Image (spheres, coloured by chain):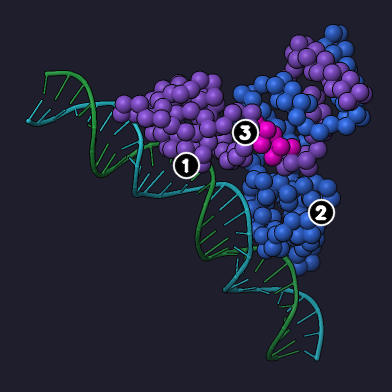
Chain colours: A blue, B purple, C cyan, D green
Amino acid sequence: MPKPPRISEAEWEVMNVLWESSPRAANEVADEICQRMRWHPKTVKTLLGRLVRKGALRYREEGNRYLYSPALPRGRFVDAESRSFVERVFGGHAAPALVHFVETMDLSDDDLQELRSMIDRKQKEDERP
Amino acid sequence: MPKPPRISEAEWEVMNVLWESSPRAANEVADEICQRMRWHPKTVKTLLGRLVRKGALRYREEGNRYLYSPALPRGRFVDAESRSFVERVFGGHAAPALVHFVETMDLSDDDLQELRSMIDRKQKEDERP
DNA sequence: TTGACACGACTACATCTGTAATCTAACTTG
DNA sequence: CAAGTTAGATTACAGATGTAGTCGTGTCAA
């Protein structure tokens, strides 16, 4: 299981649309992104190329163009990025991060409910592993 | 209230020791860091300079050297960094981030307990604002 | 007083990032 | 077949980052 390469902020944007649905041609990706962001399609192409070079994306040739897909599941990147974040900002301690999130982020009633039941479950697991 | 400048991973390292205790001279910061990390003291000096230029640190002259201190409280940076993280990795939705953390990070029994009571409190607040 | 240090200032330099433009080969259309 | 359109490949270029080294000057020890 290869470790995911580090990807930049702009690159996340691109990866996100491919995790949402792939494979897709460069143009499809560019169209979708350029609708939301104020980016030039060329910029998206550049990022696709870089992501392939980094090993974050793979592609298959189809006619005269490439169809891109993520090389690794999103979860792998999410996890790496989360750990790096917790390391940098909270000295590696997840609990303070959680506390900060619950205190400062916008959470709906349902969010809180879901969280609470997940914690309940976790605690049960811990009791009798 | 000025927005905190963006600081890089290496820069966080430096800021963290100054948030922990300040003001401190460049050498004190460097010593502490070089004990933990495999960095050259010069590297720490460079980062101190950059952080001053960015407005993340301030300094006061004392004899022939500078004493550095954070220009803004840690919380401001933590918040900015957290929001940027949630934006990038979870499309701006805090709840999935929380879920991911609870599921994948190492949390002690006490951590879970604390979280749970914080959520309880939040829910009460929401009921009667 | 003179030479060795210690400090901050300035300089260095390869990579990575954001943001594109240009080049080239294939494909499409008159 | 020739010219325009596309797609990917290559090149550009400034600012951020990681990681130091060099310069000039003030200071302390002898």
Left or right: A73, with B45 as reference point: right
Spatial CA distance of label 3 from label 2 is 38 Å
Q: Are marks 1 and 2 on the same chain?
A: no
The residue wearing badge 2 is A23
Task: Name the spot of residue D21 as percent of width and height, x first.
Answer: 32, 40
Quarter of the image with the N terminus of chain A is: top right
Q: In the rendered structure, which amino acid carries the disc numbered 1?
A: Arg
Q: Position of residue A87 (x, y in %)?
A: 63, 27
Was residue B79 drawn as part of the magenta stretch in this picture? yes
Q: Position of residue C8 (x, y in %)?
A: 36, 35
Label 3 vs 1, first from the N-terminus = 1
Query: Which residue carries the number 3 mark?
Result: B77
Dot 2 falls on which chain? A
Q: Find the magenta span and give its range.
A: B77-86
Q: Residue B90's x, y, as percent?
A: 78, 39
Q: Residue at 53%, 32% (x, y): give it.
A: B71
For the stretch drawn in magenta, what is the main secondary structure? Answer: helix
Q: Which residue is mark 1?
A: B53
